Amino acid sequence: MTILVTGATGAVGRLVVAELLNAGQHVRALTRTPAAANLPDGVEVVGGDLEDPASLEGVFDGVDRMYLFPIGRTAREVVAAAKQTGVRRIVVLSGAMAGSDDGPGGYLPVERAVEDSGLEWTHVRPGEFALNWLGWAAAIKAERVVRRPYGGAVTQPTHEADVAAVAATVLVEDGHAGRKYTLAGPEALTTVAQAHAIGAAIGDEVRFEELDPVEARGQWIRDGYPEAFVDWIFMLWAESARHPEPVNEEWASVVPRLTGRPARTFAEWATDHSADFR
Ligand SMILES: NC(=O)c1ccc[n+]([C@@H]2O[C@H](COP(=O)([O-])OP(=O)(O)OC[C@H]3O[C@@H](n4cnc5c(N)ncnc54)[C@H](OP(=O)(O)O)[C@@H]3O)[C@@H](O)[C@H]2O)c1
């Protein structure tokens, strides 16, 4: 069986490739720049751009299943080409916000294209990636500090390795067709606790400095974040700081249920990435 992994050079995609190789599958990996892919031996690397469906000629030949990195604009054409060439199952890297209308998402057009295709599909909808915390790396490296508004806001960070493990499981195993798996890590942690967990992982104290939300908003916009995104995320954090949610046990249960292994904690994630913060 040949499984096509799109987004194969991404943080999750590389781990999906590794999981599938471990499971003994033949992996074809799509990238826009094959020369820079640096994927393991045994992976068949092919060139193509999901935003340019014409560039995908031949990419689906002999492919049975596909892991689809979410690009909404061309999803229908990509899925149609895959179906026409004989792909039978598509696993979408989606997001927990896919089900709501207020996120910046962009996942729904991909999910709908796949659902409408008549192929077997499964959506993997992770919550916030712990990887987003790499945005703190420069300040932690330089000053051992995290400066943010809403230190009491709670999130349930998801380790990219768990996203990949779930995706690989539903690519290989039967019994997941038509399922939407929203998943997250095992703990709900405040922003302050996350900063301290990174400190523990690097064996040094990391301070948290609470910023004024109005000043922080202005700074983020000056730094180039889209205003709508900043307002959306600040609104979520403000709400979370006022009413911290407990762990979403349903989301936390997906990784152990599907992979048979406990979901990775934020402390494990911080340890896995400690070199990025030292
Ligand atoms: N951050 C979060 O909190 C969060 C939460 C839920 C879901 N997500 C989803 O997860 C995604 C990130 O996944 P990731 O970390 O594995 O990816 P990543 O590290 O951001 O890498 C992006 C990957 O997508 C590929 N790619 C991008 N545009 C492409 C195109 N036009 N054609 C073909 N390949 C293309 C890149 O391949 P090449 O450059 O090699 O072509 C690369 O492998 C986000 O984009 C979002 O959709 C994120």
Image (tube, rainbow, N blue to C red):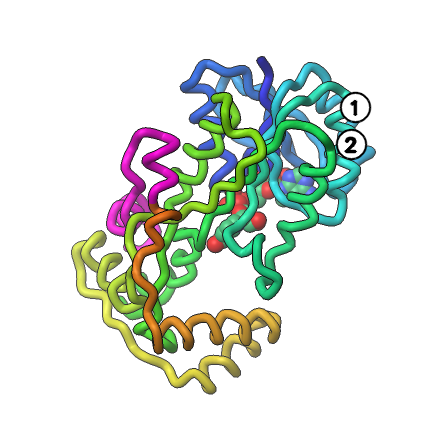
Q: Position of residue 43 (x, y in %)?
A: 54, 20
| Mark 2 Cα-neighbour bin, 10 Å: few <14, some 14–19, many ≥20 | some
Q: CA distance from mark 2 to mark 1?
A: 6 Å
- Quadrant in the picture for the C terminus: bottom left
Residue at point 51%, 29% (across, down):
176
At a point 55% along the width and 76% down the height, the residue shown is 231
Kind of residue at badge 1: Gln
Between 5 and 137, the residue placed more toward the observer is 5
Tell me the SS state at disc 2.
helix
* Residue 147 seen anywhere in this rendered image of the structure: no
Mark 1, ligand 1, within 8 Å: the answer is: no
Judged by its main secondary structure, the magenta piece is helix
Quadrant in which residue 93 is drawn:
top right
Q: Which residue is identified by label 1? A: 84
Q: Is residue 3 left or right of residue 130?
A: right
- The stretch of residues the image draws in magenta is 253-278
Residue on which the image places disc 2: 80
Q: Amino acid at mark 2?
A: Ala
Q: Are marks 2 and 1 in contact (CB under 8 Å)?
A: yes
Q: Is residue 152 above or below residue 211?
A: above
Residue visible at 63% across and 44% down?
Answer: 70
Quadrant holding the N terminus: top right
Q: Does any portion of residue 190 appear in the rendered image?
A: yes
Indicate the position of residue 117 as horizontal and vertical percent values. Answer: 73, 33
